[in-house]
Image: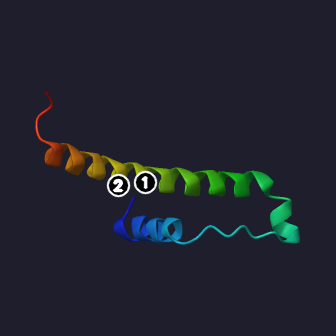
Amino acid sequence: MDRQLMEEIKQRMDADFLPAPSASALSQGDGRMADAAEYAAYHLGQINKKLDRLIALLEARAGPAI
């Protein structure tokens, strides 16, 4: 993938997920569910990264385990 496409995807994932319930979107439920799942997976990954950094900081501060 090119860099511009990756930036567009990241911007879309960083924005709040707002389902678009319209007559045409309601008939495309599978696509909307896939978008919601992708959005949730992205944000869970971001939370995981932050928790990993927090744990590393806490472990470094606590010093060696006894």
Q: Does 37 appear above or below 20?
A: above
**In which quadrant of the rendered view does residue 3 lie?**
bottom left
Q: How is the image coloured?
A: rainbow
Which residue is the site of mark 2?
A: 50
- Outermost residue toward the front? 66
**Mark 2, residues whose alpha carbon is within 10 Å: few (<14), some, or many (≥20)?**
few
Residue 13: percent from the left, percent from the top?
A: 51, 65
Left or right: where does residue 44 sit relative to residue 58? right
Give amino acid for label 1: Ile
The residues tagged by marks 2 and 1 sit, at their Cα atoms, a distance apart of 5 Å
Q: Does 28 appear above or below 5?
A: above
Residue at 62% in and 51% down: 37
Residue nearest the observer in this picture, 6 or 15: 15
User: Label 1 near label 2: C-beta < 8 Å?
Assistant: yes
Give amino acid for label 2: Lys
Residue at 52% in and 69% down: 12
Residue at 35% in and 50% down: 51
Residue 22: percent from the left, percent from the top?
A: 84, 71
Residue nearest the observer in this picture, 15 or 47: 47
Residue 40: percent from the left, percent from the top?
A: 57, 54
Q: Which mark is residue 57?
A: none
Left or right: where does residue 53 sit relative to residue 9? left
Q: Does 11 appear above or below 45?
A: below
Residue 42: percent from the left, percent from the top?
A: 49, 54
| Quarter containing the C terminus | top left
**Mark 1, residues whose alpha carbon is within 10 Å: few (<14), some, or many (≥20)?**
few
Residue nearest the observer in this picture, 66 or 10: 66
Q: Which mark is residue 47?
A: 1
| Quarter containing the N terminus | bottom left
What kind of element bears circle 2? helix
